[in-house]
Image: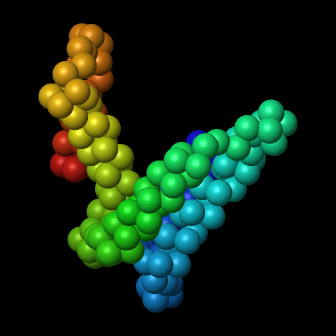
Amino acid sequence: MALSMTTQCCNILPSYFSDTSGVSSLFRTCGFYFGGVLGFVLTALPSMVRRREYGRRGEWITAGVLICLNTAANVLFFYRGLDILTKNGCGGLGYPLAIGACVAGFSLYSLLILKEKFARLSIAGLAAVCFGIIIIAIR
């Protein structure tokens, strides 16, 4: 969690400081991945080595495809969007909005497409995420 928060802060900072405005979205995406790889190396890799379980080939292919899609989305949309939000004085809104939209989207997908049953507490959590996004955006 600390690595994730640090990575998010470091990726938002170039949008706020004119001295670092030349930092490209590709560099910020690589910084984001560096934080993710560091977290993986510190938390998951030691147990994988200890148990000698490195995952199946399909899992690594899926991870590679998702990384490519995430990289394209970051480089083409997300960091440019952060720069636009910062010009309007609300650059810190980018990450909470993106994460909240992912949570809400996945929950709706599970409910509507997969036809999973939701407990009242899950629906209350989804509503809290949606209201949180609205409150952050209004503020």
Asked if 12 appears above or below 4 in the picture, the reply is: below
**Viewer-proximal residue among 39 and 44:** 44
Q: Pinpoint residue 53: horizontal percent, then vertical percent.
A: 73, 38
Q: Can see residue 6? A: no
Q: Residue at x 44, y 59 (%)?
A: 65
Q: Among all residues in the image, which is located at the extreme left?
A: 112
Q: Is residue 106 left or right of residue 4?
A: left
Asked if 28 appears above or below 123 in the picture, the reply is: below
**Viewer-proximal residue among 30 and 115:** 115
Q: Residue at x 61, y 43 (%)?
A: 56
Quadrant housing residue 132: top left
Q: Pinpoint residue 84: horizontal percent, then vertical percent.
A: 26, 74
Q: Is residue 110 left or right of residue 60?
A: left
Asked if 51 appears above or below 98 in the picture, the reply is: above
Q: Residue at x 50, y 73 (%)?
A: 28
Asked if 15 appears above or below 118 in the picture, the reply is: below
Q: Can see residue 113? A: yes
